DNA sequence: CCTATAGCCTGACGGC
DNA sequence: TGCCGTCAGGCTATAG
């Protein structure tokens, strides 16, 4: 699930629940979740500290622990956060959790163990090391920068949107959503797009990501006209009622409307 | 350098 | 009911 809008919602959730509380314990149920970090080191770094702030870049969430550094969280395909007190309320695939002085825990649930939690001294250094492009919602990432990032790319437009080095945050689902609103087929080649199409794509990228965050990235709360609620359900275009088609692009299933998208 | 593809992981789901 | 194949909203290493 977790692409930029989902992680933005996780950030809000973490900010609303876990900030400024003394961390009294760390529980690691699954070592493979940790990226270049032992449970002991993690414990030493956060214990008796507190989450004092957070940032997001693309699909990554960073939780600041005072001046000690930043916890880095990536959610793979299936991870999410859950703040709970009652052990019965713990999510089914809790891999790691932080206990607070008030008795609550912030749990990291990751069914497929494709997500990773690590540590960095600097968010900027982390972004550089991972070769991540600018966050898709960064205001500095404007149309000019978008055109420049696309120039020289030869593949399909959907692959480019999902390329985290081009811009960070867009995955399979939201690339389809953006292309649907832009009226562009996912399998189109970058070089074949007109200047106007690139401008529309850019505008819809910003619009879709912002709009879905406003609606908690929840398919059931999105207003009419979005692809996401129809994806794999009734499978019909909300604009023209044509049946959506699917096609593998970059090894992932793409959904598109053969009538609305050119 | 670039792009496309296989593999990593677990578990939910549908068909038989 | 139970088993099995398929597939899932990501990333990385590797091949071409």
Image (cartoon, coloured by chain):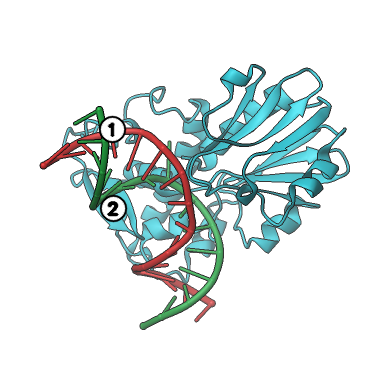
Chain colours: A cyan, B red, C green
Q: Is residue A127 left or right of residue A69?
A: left
Residue A260 x/y as whole percent: 23, 43
Vertical order, A260 against A129 (above or below): above
**Of callouts 2 and 1, which one flags the residue occurring earlier in the amino acid sequence?**
2
Residue bearing mark 2: A185
Residue A56 x/y as whole percent: 65, 42
Q: In the figure, residue A174 lies in which quadrant? A: top left
Residue A249 x/y as whole percent: 32, 58
Q: Residue A262: tell me if it is visible.
A: no
Vertical order, A232 against A114 (above or below): above
What residue is rendered at 78% in x and 17% in y?
Answer: A102
Q: Is residue C2 left or right of residue A26?
A: left
For the residues labelled 2 and 1, say whether their Cβ atoms are less than 8 Å apart: no
Front one among A225 and A97: A97
Vertical order, A199 against A47 (above or below): below
| Circle 2 or circle 1, nearest the eye | 1
Disc sitting over residue A230 in the figure: 1
Q: Residue A99: tell me if it is visible.
A: yes
Spatial separation of the CA atoms under disc 2 and disc 1: 17 Å
Residue A143 x/y as whole percent: 52, 53
Q: Which structural element holds mark 1? A: helix
What residue is rendered at 30% in x and 60% in y?
Answer: A188
Both on one chain, marks 2 and 1? yes
């Amino acid at each position: 699930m977790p692409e930029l809008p989902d992680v933005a919602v996780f950030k809000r959730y973490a900010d609303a629940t876990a900030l400024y509380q003394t961390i009294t314990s760390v529980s690691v149920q699954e070592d493979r979740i940790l990226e270049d970090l032992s449970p002991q080191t993690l414990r030493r770094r956060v214990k008796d500290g507190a989450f004092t702030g957070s940032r997001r870049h693309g699909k990554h969430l960073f939780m600041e622990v005072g001046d000690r550094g930043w916890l880095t969280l990536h959610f793979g395909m299936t991870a999410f956060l859950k703040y709970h007190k009652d052990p019965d309320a713990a999510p089914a695939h809790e891999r790691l959790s932080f206990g607070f002085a008030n008795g609550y825990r912030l749990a990291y649930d990751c069914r497929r163990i494709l997500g990773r939690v690590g540590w960095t001294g600097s968010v900027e250094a982390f972004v550089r090391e991972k070769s991540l492009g600018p966050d898709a919602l960064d205001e500095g990432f404007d149309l000019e920068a978008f055109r420049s990032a696309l120039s020289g790319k030869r593949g399909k437009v959907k692959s480019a949107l999902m390329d985290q080095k081009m811009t960070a945050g867009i995955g399979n689902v939201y690339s389809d959503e953006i292309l649907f609103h832009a009226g562009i087929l996912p399998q189109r080649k970058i070089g074949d797009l007109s200047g106007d199409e690139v401008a529309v794509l850019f505008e819809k990228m910003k619009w879709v990501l912002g709009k879905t965050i406003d609606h908690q990235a929840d398919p059931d709360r999105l207003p009419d006209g979005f692809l996401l609620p129809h994806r794999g359900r009734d499978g019909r275009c909300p604009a023209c009622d044509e049946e959506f088609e699917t096609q593998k692009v970059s090894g992932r299933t793409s959904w598109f409307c053969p009538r609305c998208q050119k």
